[in-house]
């Protein structure tokens, strides 16, 4: 990573040039680089977290979860095609950003923010947010499903999301010092007065699930020890 940092320029009188003023450039780039590396080091996972992550049982759950989230991401496009027939609603369109107000009007919550596990973002926090985010999207799809003419692909997607939540919650149980009961998805009371709102709600749920799924992939990839083995080989 390259850093673009200001250099400190200070005046200095030079005896060799009859008192003229020269310039001294101080090494702020080096100082800033060491500061950056110190910050990076502080964000590394804690030793006890690393020991848990490296455990074979945990690794099996990580790899199973990666397989499921990748399957979910691959199926989103076909699911969208099967139930969205409004031509203006395209899965990867830049126009989706203009639907933020409508998402709020319908009552679609934002997904939890996911980051790669570090000292400042614990394994438990990451797994909790994965579980919460997946259950949020599952609840949204359950809410719109009865209003869809073709729901077969949505039903299949719901089953995969449920399976993934089970895997994530198993990892979360291993990471928690105390056992906590994971809540079931809360039914969503969406405002869907007409067919167009149903279409928009389903579309936005799949768009958001795709983005959240991509963040989930990045988080799980950072926990997967087989990545290191592949790199070394």
Image (cartoon, helix red, strand yellow):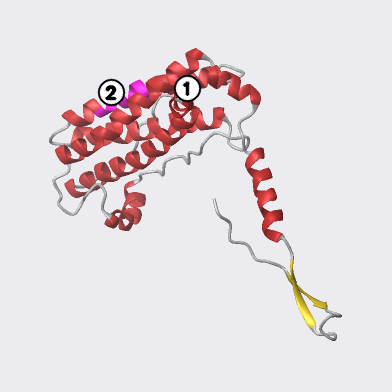
Give yes or no for residue 49 being in the magenta stretch: no
Question: Quick check: 192 above or below 154?
Answer: below
Kindly identify which residue carries mark 2.
Answer: 159
Give yes or no for residue 158 being in the magenta stretch: yes
Within the image, what quadrant is residue 108 found in? top left
| Residue 73 in the image, given as x and y percentages of width and height | 30, 34
Count residues near mark 2 (Cα–Cα under 10 Å), then give few for <14, some for 14-19, many for 20+: few
The residue lying at 28 percent from left, 40 percent from top is: 206
Asked if one can make out residue 180 in the rendered structure from this viewpoint, the answer is no
Closest to the observer, 225 or 142: 225
At numbered mark 2, what does the secondary structure look like: helix, strand or loop?
helix
The mark nearer the N terminus, 1 or 2, is 2
The residue lying at 67 percent from left, 58 percent from top is: 29
Choose mark 1 or mark 2, whichever is in front. Answer: 2
Asked whether, in this view, residue 40 is left or right of residue 220, the answer is right
Q: For the C terminus, which image quadrant?
A: top left
Question: Quick check: 31 above or below 78?
Answer: below
| Residue 220 in the image, given as x and y percentages of width and height | 45, 29
Tell me the magenta residue range.
Answer: 157-164
Q: CA distance from mark 1 to mark 2?
A: 18 Å
- The majority secondary structure of the magenta stretch comes to helix
At numbered mark 1, what does the secondary structure look like: helix, strand or loop?
loop
The residue lying at 49 percent from left, 17 percent from top is: 58
């Amino acid at each position: 990573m390259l850093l673009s940092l200001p250099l400190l320029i200070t005046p200095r009188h030079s005896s060799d040039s009859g008192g003229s003023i020269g310039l001294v450039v101080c090494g702020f780039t080096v100082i800033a680089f060491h500061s950056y590396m110190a910050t990076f080091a502080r964000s590394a996972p804690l030793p006890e977290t690393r020991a848990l992550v490296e455990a074979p049982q945990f690794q099996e759950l990580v790899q199973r979860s990666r397989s499921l989230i990748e399957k979910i991401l691959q199926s989103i496009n076909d699911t969208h095609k099967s139930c969205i027939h409004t031509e203006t609603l395209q899965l990867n369109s830049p126009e989706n950003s203009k639907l933020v107000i409508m998402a709020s009007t319908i009552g679609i919550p934002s997904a939890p923010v996911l980051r790669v596990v570090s000292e400042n973002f614990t394994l438990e926090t990451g797994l909790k947010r994965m579980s919460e985010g997946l259950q949020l999207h599952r609840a949204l799809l359950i809410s719109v499903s009865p209003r869809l003419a073709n729901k077969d692909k949505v039903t299949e997607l719901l089953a995969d999301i449920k399976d993934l939540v089970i895997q994530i919650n198993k990892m979360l149980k291993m990471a928690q010092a105390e056992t906590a009961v994971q809540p079931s998805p809360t039914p969503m009371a969406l405002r869907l007065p007409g067919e167009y709102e149903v279409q928009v709600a389903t579309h936005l749920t799949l768009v958001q699930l795709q983005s959240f799924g991509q963040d989930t992939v990045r988080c799980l990839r950072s926990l997967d020890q087989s990545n290191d083995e592949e790199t070394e080989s």
